[in-house]
């Protein structure tokens, strides 16, 4: 053995032939590797062999060839040229690729074409020679095509599947080069199917579809009397493949996280959906607002939220997509009922993220949709009004540039709280309220819009009470301490009520989600062990039953309370009665 003072022997770039033939790891030492030296063999090295076809190849008589037209044209296959070629007078039609061609089965091509595209600006239909500037589509907002590319890049390289779907009407085989083929026609002609996807042929996909309609759509229809995501979206999905894929992806991911679906297949559905979303948004005319595309973005945003359970972080790509839709100039001109429903869901999603991350909501509530809602007095509109007021409170509390010493604005928001409670007594009154003999009182409502409306009203109230201490830090030290204790006691009472509403109305899971938001915002102020354990139980139950990510909130609360997560055994949540029979929309 060489001494430690000798210099190490040089290494070869590749292993020797003997080790490669035996599929053994070679130490690559030159001139003789360790294995060859021990066995007494000649250490042969031939370098890396690159397989390369000869310049001229003889094909057999049975060789299959791609059918092409006699006259060929070489075109620049960039996104800009595709838009230009898609004009009615371009004369270019879509050419179906030969799926039997061995060229299209090359996995290297799949990997190459799965990479996100650089965003390019489409050509003006009226004047193809003039490029549109960014200001003509979405001023001061992200492009929807960029949102999809960001989602794909954050998730990693996505391998496009060989087929779009097994459902009827959507089962055409696809090539990875399809997206480069010049397509003529409008957005609806390109991405809406002329044939219905029903009946669904795959029983697994049929089960995913039914799971969405029966179990997941009610999450989104809390404040919508038309129940658009339960009734209209499934119907529209029959002819809009992207929407159907979003439904499959959402259902598959939810069933996976609750333990009833294969995780690999769930990821395949999600990757396929994201790939389709990127292609659709790349060709989407952002001067308009397609209601089904907006609804698909909303569904994928919910999927994005629950995907944090495994992913660990919330990429927020589809949340930015919601902002882009609402920022579109034509969105508020004549929105469809589905677009209106999507806006309200998107606003609640923004509130959830604002509370968890302690930041402003971001979506504007100063427009015609909100004004029209404020004028109506039905229960669904009242719930939406409570959501709007909660948005304004959160923007006020987390807007550090304008909150300091702005007591006048605080008084205005607080008066809205008092007016709400005085004017809508019937809306706020539950059908049942048990004595406060447990950490959280049992409170039952008979409509989901009441649950979500009252909870957002109370959440806004708690934020304003806490903020009042920062805006009115005057008086003696004793008076300030007394006021702080009173404020904390009132906030704790509100949080108990929010948790009681969530537990007492588990037939509408978003009630539990809002309770988790309250715990995230104000749970650290609770000092009694039984209260803390009951809150952790709510967080864990929400994640286990509904795949809503609460692990980071649990860790934050345990740290604030000085707990050791490894030594704590969760207690049993009080045996709440089954309130499913009271579930109505």
Image (cartoon, rainbow, N blue to C red):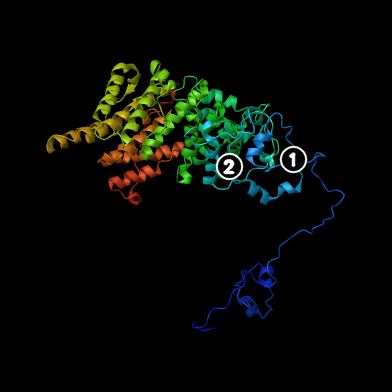
Q: Is residue 502 left or right of residue 470?
A: right
Crowding at mark 2 (Cα within 10 Å: few <14, some 14-19, many 20+): many
Where is residue 87 shown, x and y percent of the image?
68, 30
Of residues 345 and 476, which is closer to you in this image?
Answer: 476
Res. 421 image quadrant: top left
Q: Residue at x 51, y 20 (%)?
A: 334
Where is residue 550 shown, x and y percent of the image?
40, 41
Of residues 238 and 395, which is closer to you in this image?
Answer: 395
Mark 2 or 1, nearer chain start: 1
Q: Is residue 40 left or right of residue 218?
A: right
Q: Is residue 337 left or right of residue 469?
A: right
Q: Residue at x 31, y 36 (%)?
A: 401
Residue beneath disc 2: 271
Q: Could you say whether the residue bearing mark 2 is in a helix, strand or loop? A: helix
Where is residue 89 shown, x and y percent of the image?
71, 29
Q: Residue at x 46, y 30 (%)?
A: 346
| Residue 509 seen by the camera | no
- For the N terminus, the image quarter is bottom right
Real-space Cα separation, disc 2 to disc 1, in angstroms = 23 Å
Residue beneath disc 1: 97
């Amino acid at each position: 053995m060489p001494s430690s003072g000798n210099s190490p022997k040089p290494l070869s770039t590749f292993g020797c032939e003997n080790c490669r033939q035996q599929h053994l790891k070679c130490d690559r030492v030159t001139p003789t590797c360790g294995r060859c030296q021990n066995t007494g063999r000649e250490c042969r090295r031939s370098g890396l062999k690159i397989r390369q076809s000869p310049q001229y190849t003889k094909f057999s008589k049975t060789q299959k060839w791609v059918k092409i037209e006699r006259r060929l044209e070489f075109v620049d296959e960039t996104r800009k040229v595709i838009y230009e070629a898609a004009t009615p007078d371009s004369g270019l039609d879509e050419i179906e690729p030969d799926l039997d061609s061995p060229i299209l089965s090359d996995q290297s091509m799949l990997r190459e074409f799965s990479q996100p595209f650089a965003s390019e600006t489409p050509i003006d239909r009226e004047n193809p020679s003039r490029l549109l500037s960014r200001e003509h589509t979405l001023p001061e907002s992200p492009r929807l095509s960029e949102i999809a590319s960001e989602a794909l890049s954050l998730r990693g390289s996505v391998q496009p599947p060989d087929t779009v779907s097994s459902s009827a009407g959507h089962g055409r085989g696809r090539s990875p080069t399809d997206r480069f083929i010049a397509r003529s026609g409008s957005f609806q002609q390109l991405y809406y199917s002329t044939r219905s996807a029903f009946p669904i042929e795959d029983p697994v996909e049929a089960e995913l579809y039914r799971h969405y309609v029966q179990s997941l759509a009610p999450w989104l229809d809390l404040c919508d009397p038309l129940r658009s995501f339960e009734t209209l979206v499934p119907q529209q999905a029959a002819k809009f493949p992207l929407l159907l894929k979003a439904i499959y992806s959402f259902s598959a991911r939810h069933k996976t996280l609750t333990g009833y679906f294969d995780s690999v297949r769930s990821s395949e559905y999600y990757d396929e959906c994201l790939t389709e979303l990127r292609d659709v948004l790349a060709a989407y005319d952002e001067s308009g607002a397609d209601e089904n595309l907006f609804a698909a973005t909303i569904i994928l945003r919910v999927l994005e939220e629950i995907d944090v359970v495994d992913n660990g972080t919330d990429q927020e790509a589809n949340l930015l997509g919601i902002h882009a839709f609402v920022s579109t100039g034509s969105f508020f001109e004549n929105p469809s009922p589905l677009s209106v429903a999507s806006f309200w869901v998107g606003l609640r999603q923004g509130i959830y993220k604002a509370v968890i991350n302690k930041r402003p909501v971001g979506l504007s509530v100063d427009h015609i949709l909100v004004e029209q809602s404020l004028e109506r007095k039905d229960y669904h509109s009242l719930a939406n009004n409570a959501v709007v007021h909660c948005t304004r409170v959160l923007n006020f509390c987390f807007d550090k540039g304008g909150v300091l010493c702005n007591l006048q604005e605080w008084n205005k928001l607080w008066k809205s709280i008092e007016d709400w409670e005085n004017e809508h007594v019937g809306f706020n009154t539950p059908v049942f309220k048990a004595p406060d003999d447990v950490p959280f009182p049992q409170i039952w409502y008979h409509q989901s819009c009441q649950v979500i409306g009252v909870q957002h009203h109370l959440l806004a109230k708690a934020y304003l009470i806490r903020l009042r201490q920062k805006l009115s830090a005057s008086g003696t030290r004793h008076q300030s301490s007394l006021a702080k204790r009173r404020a904390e006691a009132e906030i704790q009472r509100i949080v108990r009520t929010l948790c009681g509403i969530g537990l007492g109305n588990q037939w509408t899971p978003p009630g539990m989600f809002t309770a988790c938001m309250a715990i995230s915002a104000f749970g650290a102020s609770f000092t009694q062990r039984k209260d803390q354990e009951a809150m952790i139980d709510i967080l864990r139950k929400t994640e286990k039953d509904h795949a809503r990510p609460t692990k980071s909130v649990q860790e934050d609360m345990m740290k604030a309370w000085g707990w050791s997560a490894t030594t704590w055994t969760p207690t049993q949540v009080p045996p709440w009665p089954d309130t499913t029979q009271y579930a109505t929309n």
